[in-house]
Amino acid sequence: MSELAFDPKHAAVVVIDLQKGIVGRNGAPYSAADVIKNVQRLLRAGRAAGLLPVLVHVGGAADGSDRLAPPADQAMRAGSLPPDWSELIPELERTASDVVILKRQWGAFYGTDLDLQLRRRRRDTILLCGIATEFGVESTARDAYERGYAQVFVSDAMTGLSEASHEDALTRIFPRIGLVRTTEEVLKHLERRK
């Protein structure tokens, strides 16, 4: 197991899809409330240590015309969404210096300026968390890996649509492209870096 050794001033906490239209869904193995609590702890400690908060949400045209819609056996939801569906939840305690990224698909890099925002701020490590592990988090993680970012996956600050798919990402995908750690382990690292 590799040591957790990143410089907070060169890292970012990338929070995936903690928005009004997504946090109300059932997650597993953690509830959205548990994920939100751990993300709050990460953001508070991270801001104090110099980590860059990056708040990602998915959205787009009100009529859904800019959403991906390829033929699929389990097609994604079609039609219009409630007006506040894409709004970030207030529990993130957004500040003026946080970076906010609007994406239109699962991954946070494609079609956005996330890579540009991270590189201009000299952030080479990302801590990933959010909902859902096997969709937005994993898609973003794979793109980050291909762009050369060091990654820390905060295992209890994310949740999946099922426990099996969450565990699959944590045990089969993420350990091959980064470090899997708990909120407590990350917070202890940040405390040691003060």
Image: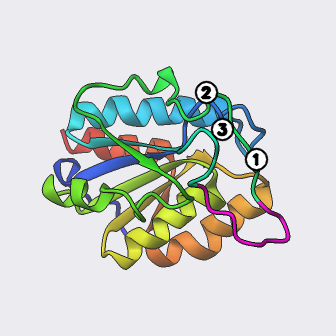
In this view, 88 is above or below 136: above
- Residue 57 falls inside the magenta stretch: no
Image coords of residue 152 (percent x, y): 41, 59
- The percent coordinates of residue 26 (x first, y second) are 78, 39
Tell us which disc is closer to us: 2 or 1.
2
**Which of the two discs, 3 and 1, sits closer to the camera?**
3
Q: Are marks 2 and 1 in contact (CB under 8 Å)?
A: no
Q: Nearer the viewer, residue 137 or 108?
A: 108
Check disc 1 and report the residue beneath it.
28
Give me the C-alpha separation between circle 3 and circle 1: 14 Å
Q: Earlier in the sequence, mark 2 or mark 1?
A: 1
Marks 2 and 3, Cα distance to the nearest angstrom? Answer: 13 Å
Looking at the image, residue 8 sits to the left or right of residue 101; the answer is: left
Check whether the beta carbons of the residues at disc 2 and disc 3 lie within 8 A of each other: no
Which element type, helix, strand or loop, lies under badge 2?
A: loop
Q: Residues within 10 Å of mark 2 (few under 14, many from 20)?
A: few
Amino acid, disc 1: Ala
Q: Is residue 139 above or below residue 14?
A: below
**Residue found 30% across the figure and 56% down from its top:** 113
Element type at mark 1: loop
Q: Is residue 129 above or below residue 140?
A: above
Where, by quadrant of the figure, is residue 148 drawn?
A: bottom left
Coloration of the structure image: rainbow
Of callouts 3 and 1, the N-terminal one = 3
Q: Is residue 1 visible?
A: no
Residue 22 is tagged as 3
Q: Disc 2 residue type?
A: Pro
- When the figure is inspected, residue 151 is found, relative to residue 191, above or below; the finding is below
Q: Residue at x 25, y 53 (%)?
A: 11
Query: In the figure, residue 144 lies in which quadrant?
Result: bottom left
Per the image, the residue denoted by label 2 is: 83
Where does the magenta region start and end? 67-75
